[in-house]
Structures are given as C-alpha cells and as structure tokens.
Amino acid sequence: MTEASTTEKSAVGRGGGVALWRQIADQLRNEIAGGVWTADAALPTEVALATRFGVNRHTVRRALAALSADGLVRSDQGRGTFVLAGRLTYPISRRTRFSEIVSRQAREPGGRMIASRVESADVRLSGFLEVPQGTPLICLETLSVADGVPISVSLNWFSADRFPNLVTGYAETGSITAAVKAEGVENYLRRWTRVRAETADAKDRDRLQLPVGASLLVTEALNEDQRGNPLHFSITRFAADRIELEIESRPEPRG
C-alpha cells in the first residue's frame, strides 16, 4: 500500500450495529488476505490508522488486538505492529520431522546450534532415556526457523556413547535426523508428547523475537529407535502465534 493511501480516510459506518473497531479489524484483515500487507510488513502507526479511519487511538488499538488474537499480526513494544505469516501447522504423530513439516507447507526450513554440552543424566533424564544415573549425555540447544522466521528453540538429549559425533553432524547439517542417520540410525519414531503453555521469558523473547507477554507452546517428547529403545528426549518451546499443533491419531483396530 502506498504512503498516500495509508493517510486517505476509509469509510466506517456509525450506527449500523457493527462496532467501529470490528469494522477496522475486518478491513485490515481483508487487506492482509489480499496481499496489500505482506508477511513481516509493518502496519501504519496507531496515529496514522486513527486518522485514516476517523476514530481515536483506543478504537484502533482494540482492532489491532483482535487481529493479534487471530494470529494475523504481532505488536512489538517500541517498534510497531507487524503482519505475521500464516501459522505453521505442526502435526504431532509417530513420525515428526521439522524439516519435512515446513517443506510440505512451501516454506524453507532451517536450524542452527545455539550451544552444546555434556551433562550427567539426572533422575528424570535417566528414567526417560533408560540409562543409569550419571550416564554422560550430549545436550544440544537448537533454534529452528521457517523462511528465516524463528519458530522454536529446543533442548535435546542423547547418549554420548551412542552418538559420539552428534554435535559435529548437527553443526554441519542443521538437522537432527541427518545427524543421527550419520551415526547409523536410519529412522526413529515418537513414543509420546506432552504439551503445556508458558509465558516467554527474556531469553525466549530474544531468541524467538517475541514481545513482552508472548505465549509459548512447550512440548516434551521422547523418540525411540526402530527397536523401541529410547533415542532422544527433547523440550521444545514454540512461538504460539506462529504455529498450531495438530495431534494426529489412528483409529483403534477393529476386533
């Protein structure tokens, strides 16, 4: 949209039974759907929108809040309001692979290592991975993106004895699937996933480029190899306004 058109007044009807903020939200929603405002584009300021629609800033703010609740925009304090790409649908199934999920939705996946370290398995991790307490584990901290937009940060634990070259493999490929395949694991499956909601802390907001008060979807997951042995435990923190989890289930077999 041109600078001139952002300052031209747009008609909103008074007395027609539809709240002004809703009319504004609907007009902006239609413009986003029509490609007038593309992903990551900054919307005009509240002052500019108030002038355009002939309303006060409080009305504009309510309209933007409605768009934010719908996952269409995000408001970054001190920076403005930005259009979001459509939410990424993220299926949780027996085979869950970030790169495949993103690629199927015509987006470019990417991953990078934030940090790596060796830890001793505590009571919780030893129980999940079925190893003795104190067993050396590789912990990978990773960032995953789609079309360059941060989607999630993860902590991932593996047996250090089983995957001695995992850190190098992930650093070279940005893919856990490729890294474990190089260590001889051709395939792995999801045993279980747990989901909860949290508010992003300062570290999450910095890494995922989120505003204060942003919500996260947090998954804990255990993957197993083809023999049913625990392979990989992860805690992943997703930007909630950029993703929707789709829980896949199979029908019970008929007796």
Image (cartoon, rainbow, N blue to C red):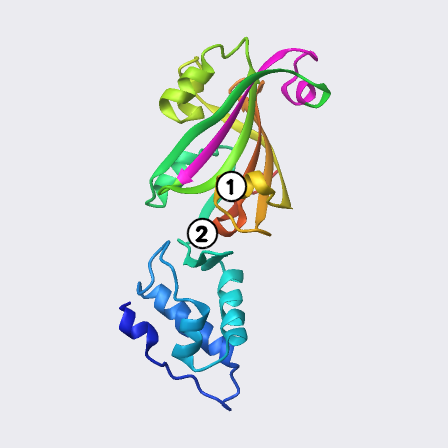
In this view of the protein, can residue 118 be seen by the observer? yes
* Relative height, residue 32 to residue 207 (above, below): below
The residue nearer to you, when weighing 58 against 230, is 58
Q: Is residue 212 above or below residue 206?
A: below
Single out the residue that lies furthest toward the bottom: 15
x, y (%) of residue 111?
41, 32
Q: Earlier in the sequence, mark 2 or mark 1?
A: 2
Outermost residue toward the right in this view: 123
Q: Which residue is mark 1?
A: 206
Res. 250 visible in picture = no
Question: Nearest the camera: 27 or 246?
Answer: 27
The residue stretch that appears in magenta: 125-145
Q: Residues within 10 Å of mark 1 (few under 14, many from 20)?
A: few
- Residue located at (29% from left, 69% from top): 3
At 48% from the left edge and 34% from the top edge, which residue is drawn? 96
Q: Nearer the viewer, mark 2 or mark 1?
A: 1
Whole-Å distance between the Cαs marked 2 and 1?
A: 20 Å
Q: Residue at x 70, y 18 (%)?
A: 122
Classify 10 Å Cα crowding around label 2: few (below 14), some (14-19), many (20 and above).
some
Residue for point 41% across, 26% down: 175
Q: Position of residue 201 (x, y in %)?
A: 61, 42
Was residue 64 drawn as part of the magenta stretch in this picture? no
Amino acid type for the residue under numbered disc 2? Arg
For disc 2, the marked residue is 87
Count how many numbered circles sit on residues in the image: 2
Q: Amino acid at mark 1?
A: Asp
Residue 165 in picture, x, y percent from top left: 45, 12
Quadrant that contains the C terminus: top right
Q: Quadrant of residue 196?
A: top right
- Residue 141 part of the magenta segment: yes
Viewport quadrant of the N terminus? bottom left
Q: Position of residue 118 (x, y in %)?
A: 57, 15
